[in-house]
Amino acid sequence: MISRIKTGVSGLDDLIEGGFPEKDLVLLSGTCGAGKTVFGLQFLYSEASREPGIYVSFEEGLPQILGTARNFGWDTQKLEKINKLRFLKYDPFKLEDIFEIIESNIREINARRVVIDSISALGIYVKDPTELRRMILQVSNMLRKNDCTSLLISEILANENSLSRFGVEEFVVDGVVLLHNVLVGGEYRRGLSVWKMRSTDHSKKIHPYRISQKGFVVYPSDTISLEIRR
């Protein structure tokens, strides 16, 4: 039986047999403004007291990320002080020792969850798809070796039917979660679907979600079945 960890996202675990498979790397893809950062923060914060986590940003500054957490009442500062959370910011154009640095931080706080935000920034630097794929495999192996369950965030362009920014990410991860903008009755609504999840009998439908004062909430009993326009 596969060990699973709770995602911390209300309603999502009902769609994936109770949570992400432990030690897997899951791709989270969505357009600008879909709530990817909120999802990633919630994934870390919800279980940080038991499973320490690290947020690695290659794009957004840490003050903005921490400000987002505060907007939901998440006291990340308290958890940072006791080494349950750690936030790292790196320039994607200076990647010489990045994996060693991430691994060192994982071991320092015994991290069990990692969010990498985003592969889109790395892909702009690593222009060759083969090299990008090799890099993702390298980080996946490092995270798995250190017993981490991880999210890899990817921004996808609006109005494109793609699973990731560069078209290689989905082939080297264990799971893919998509955040859609769905056109329903002339109005765009947010929807979440699980494209793939290793060894999991997951939902094959699109489920509405919203970002409330409590964070990211998925509605597993409801579905959206009309035209998708990402």
Image: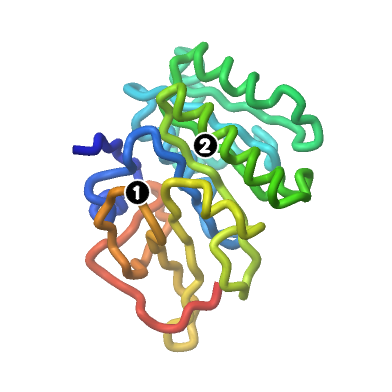
Percent of width and height locating residue 82: 45, 13
Asked whether residue 75 is in view, the answer is: no
- Badge 1 local density, few (<14 within 10 Å), some, or many (20+)? some
Q: Mark 1 points at which residue?
A: 198
Q: In which quarter of the image is the N terminus?
A: top left
The image quadrant that residue 52 belongs to is top left
Q: How many marks?
A: 2
Give the crowd class for mark 2: few <14, some 14-19, many >=20 residues within 10 Å. many
* Disc 2 residue type (three-letter): Val
Residue 66 x, y percent position in the rendering: 57, 34
Mark carried by residue 37: none
Q: How far apart are marks 2 and 1 (CA)?
A: 19 Å
Q: Label 1, secondary structure: give it.
A: loop
Residue at 57% x, 38% y: name it: 137
Q: Which circle, 2 or 1, is nearer the viewer? A: 1
Note whether 143 is above or below 133 in the view shown.
above
- The residue under label 2 is 115
